[in-house]
Amino acid sequence: MRPRVLIYSKDPDFFLVFGHILGVAGFDSQLLSAENELPRGEAVPLAVVMDCQPGDRTVARLCASFKGSLETRTAAVVGLVAPGASGLHLDLIKAGADEIFSRPFPPEKLLTWLQSRAAAAKTSVESEAGDLVHGDFVLERRSHRILYRGQDIAVPPIEFNLLRSLMARPGAVLSRESLIKAAWPDHAGETDIRGVDVHVARLRKRLTAVIGHDVIRTVRSAGYAFAPDW
């Protein structure tokens, strides 16, 4: 089955152009309107590509709707920001967008990103017990164990929660605010955002010591992503 990508745009030409590009690359595309923001009774799409035009605040609302719903939060959201709409970058980040590209850009850049998401979707699995498996990584929720090729990686509870949040959405950039909620659920409002950087640095050091390379990507001014293959 071909991965399905929803395209939000008020411009028919945008949908025709990007729908054709995606189709040639092996994706199915479907136009998404603001009135039909959460398709019911359908499988969750691989991704949502959003045409971000100056003054269109709908894109941030739609992004927040997808990321705030249990039914669709696993769909990756990517904003394609048109010239003159740079002010939407921050709105999209706050709404939980996984990636943002400023136009114009080579279409191959978007295709590479979507293909990596499709590959991650095939290799990342969450069991009924809440365990996460991604390639050689296994994160066991109940036992609080992290395994890499069968080798234990000991981490304290806060770092375990951070990694679990990152592994649940491989490749997605998670803001420091969302990671605070994941690591300190009972004290999110009292936690200094700089504490996230400290604990991510410690987690990164522990993982690298066993794996041999860094698997957490830092995105300046946006947050962090679990990226074992970057």
Image (cartoon, rainbow, N blue to C red):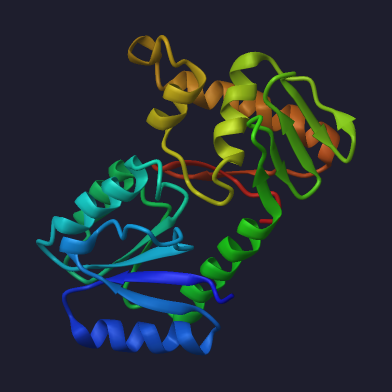
The answer to whether residue 219 of the structure is visible from this angle is yes
Residue at far front of view: 41
Nearer the observer, 200 or 65: 65
Outermost left residue: 55
**Residue at 24% in and 59% down:** 37
Q: Quadrant of residue 2?
A: bottom right
For image coordinates 23% across by 47% down, the residue present is 91
Position above or below: 166 against 78: above
Which quadrant is the N terminus positioned in? bottom right
The residue sitting at the right extreme is: 150
**Residue that appears at 22% across and 60% down:** 86
Relative to 153, does residue 128 appear above or below in the rendering? below
Q: Nearer the viewer, residue 30 or 157?
A: 30
Which percent across, then down, holds residue 172?
50, 49
Answer with left or right where residue 55 lies relative to residue 50.
Answer: left
Q: Position of residue 101 (x, y in %)?
A: 37, 65
Name the side, left or right, on which 128 lies relative to 39: right
Residue found 29% across the figure and 44% down from its top:
95
Quarter of image, res 52: bottom left
Q: Is residue 105 visible?
A: no
Q: Is residue 204 left or right of residue 137?
A: left
- Position in image of residue 194 (x %, y %): 44, 22
